[in-house]
Amino acid sequence: MYAADGEFGRARGLIIDVRDQHVTHLLVDKGQLWRRRRIAVPVESVTTFGDGIQLDLTRAQVRDLPRIPPDGEA
C-alpha cells in the first residue's frame, strides 16, 4: 500500500457495513511483529489499484487514522 508520499504498509482486511453491504475501510498493518499496528483507512482515500493500492493521504495522515487491535488482541 502506498500513501501519497511513499510506501506505507500492507492491506490485511476490509470493514464492511452489513446494512448496505459496502466496503467502508481497508485494514492496513504497519510495523513489525512486536510493534505492529492495524489502521482503518477509509475506502474513499483509495485512488487506484494496480501494482499496489494508492492512497490520496500522506503517511502522516494515515498514521493519525483510528487504530484497530490486530487479530488476537482486544
Image: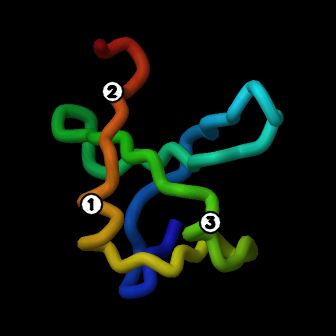
Q: Residue at x 55, y 50 (%)?
A: 11
Callout 2 environment at 10 Å: few (<14), some (14 to 19), or many (20+)? few
Q: Secondary structure at mark 2?
A: loop
Mark 1 residue crowding within 10 angstroms, few (<14) / some (14–19) / many (20+): some
Q: Earlier in the sequence, mark 1 or mark 3?
A: 3
For the residue marked with disc 1, what is the amino acid? Arg
* x, y percent for residue 10: 49, 54
Residue that sits furthest to the front in the current view: 19
Find numbered disc 3 in the image and state the secondary structure of the residue it sits on: helix
- Which of the marked residues, 3 or 2, is nearer the chain's N terminus? 3
Locate residue 12, reporting x and y percent. Answer: 55, 41
Q: Which residue is mark 3?
A: 44
The residue singled out by tag 1 in the image is 63
Compared with residue 34, is residue 23 higher up or lower down, i.e. above or below?
below
Residue ID at (26%, 44%): 32
Closer to viewer: mark 1 or mark 3: 3
Q: Which residue is mark 2?
A: 69
